[in-house]
Image: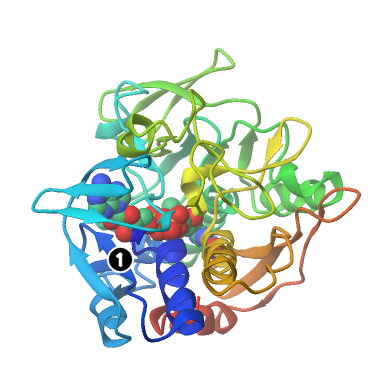
Amino acid sequence: MVLGGGFGGAQAALTTDGLLGDGHRITVVDRSEASYLCGANPLLMVGERPRAGVTRPLATLAEHGIDLVLDEILTIDPDGRRVQTTRQVLPFDYLVVALGAVYDWNAVPGSGAAGSFYDHAHSVALREAVGRFEGGKVVVAVSGAPYKCPPAPLEAALVLEWHFRKRGVPAQIHLCIPEPAPLAVAGPETAKRVADVLTSRGVVLHTQATATSLEDSGRRVYLSDGSTLDADLSMVVPVHRAPAVAVEAGLTMGMPWVPVDPETLETRAAPGVFAVGDVNSIPIGGERALPKAGVFASAQGRLAAEVIASRVLGTSPPAPYDGAGSCFLHLSGEEVAEVGGVFLAPGGPQVGLGDPRPASFKERWEAEWQRFEI
Ligand SMILES: Cc1cc2nc3c(=O)[nH]c(=O)nc-3n(C[C@H](O)[C@H](O)[C@H](O)COP(=O)(O)OP(=O)(O)OC[C@H]3O[C@@H](n4cnc5c(N)ncnc54)[C@H](O)[C@@H]3O)c2cc1C
């Protein structure tokens, strides 16, 4: 049984189905009929993607013979091996928890009244505000770490700068991030290259500065470094948390995210219960954890499926998870670069920033996602 049909859950289900074949039942439970590709939101907010978003229907999983249950998951009972949804109790032999992260709009007072590109509904509202914007100060502020796809706020700042320049709208963009440097997780060389791109485009970078509260519908932004920014347009990256249903099941073991064996993605709390994607936390050395991103969630979903299939079939387990993957960083509406590498390489993360490529490169990735290949 797979909880969540997003990046991680879909790949876990499809891979298990492919490896086990007939004689086994794979069930995916999700409350939503379709997934939105959040990676398209920065372009959606400047009108470069359809207002309806980039989506894929979960019904496609059913076409592969996977049982699809569209329902709210209420409780997970790891010891009793069952999941309670609004309408039924579902027993399982193996479980993959791929429930993602939830946004806590109350953690930073006033953040709910500002703009955001972190979900589809907010991105659509922001598209209207960006379209009406006639000039002034724009603030893009992260509320705290960890947050999905660390390149996304940088990308939003760069895409906005490109969009307003193209429209001839005078805008000064301020970007506030918790890290000491942009993409600090990718090492000092990458961080410097990204900081140079931002400053060369006139983006004012505030490091180790997160939004602590917002007033007047986001027109005043208070930051953790004690400064205040008055904004004509503001947008926040909300505080992320593990879903309550995973916490209440004991899977987080008192920590903010679900701890897992980094080699197999089996939860520390319950044998035969795996956690993949944004819901887990995988240390990569020091205080750092693997970034939360769809590419990692997909790869983890596949790996957990291979581990489960090897146990069911009595075959050799797969090679340990390597934390390989890269995210996209749109430098404008026309150019995109990849940032990533192997985060669990022996000796420490091997991560860097690729050279700029035409934006069509990412469009191909979006199409692959829509075909459930990612
Ligand atoms: C602006 C932005 C840009 C991004 N860009 C990129 C990018 O370029 N590349 C990249 O790889 N990643 C990117 N990401 C990150 C990526 O979207 C996430 O990391 C990814 O979606 C995580 O996958 P997941 O399977 O862990 O969770 P999700 O995809 O969030 O799936 C979780 C699923 O669980 C379901 N669910 C949750 N709780 C319940 C419940 N109680 N009952 C029923 N169903 C439930 C949800 O409906 C959802 O379908 C970006 C994110 C944002 C916000």
Residue 168 lies in quadrant: bottom left
- In the picture, measured across the screen, residue 70 lies left or right of residue 5, that is left
**Residue that sits furthest to the top in the current view:** 226
Q: Is residue 54 left or right of residue 169?
A: left
Q: Which residue appears at 51% of the width and 54% of the height?
A: 276
The residue at the point 65 percent across, 53 percent down is 201
Q: Is residue 110 visible?
A: yes
List x then y, in percent, for residue 285: 79, 38
Q: Which residue is pictured at 42% across the width and 41% down the height?
A: 136
How crowded pointer 1 is (Cα within 10 Å; few <14, some 14-19, many 20+) is rated as: many
**What amino acid is labelled 1 in the image?**
Val
- For the residue pair 238 and 359, the one nearer the viewer reads as 238
Residue 326, compared with residue 112, is above or below; it is below
- Residue 124 placed where, x, y %? 25, 58
Query: Between residues 69 and 127, which one lies in front from this camera angle?
Result: 69
> Where residue 79 sits: x, y (%)?
37, 39
**x, y (%) of residue 239?**
42, 32
Residue hosting label 1? 28
Q: What's the residue at 44%, 41% (across, down)? A: 138
Horizontally, residue 123 falls left or right of residue 174, namely: left
Q: Quadrant for ligand 1?
A: bottom left
In the figure, 164 relative to 114: above or below? Answer: below
Against 236, is 253 above or below? above
**Which element type, helix, strand or loop, lies under badge 1?**
strand
The answer to whether residue 164 shows anywhere in this view is: no
Q: Nearer the viewer, residue 306 or 362?
A: 306
Outermost right residue = 347
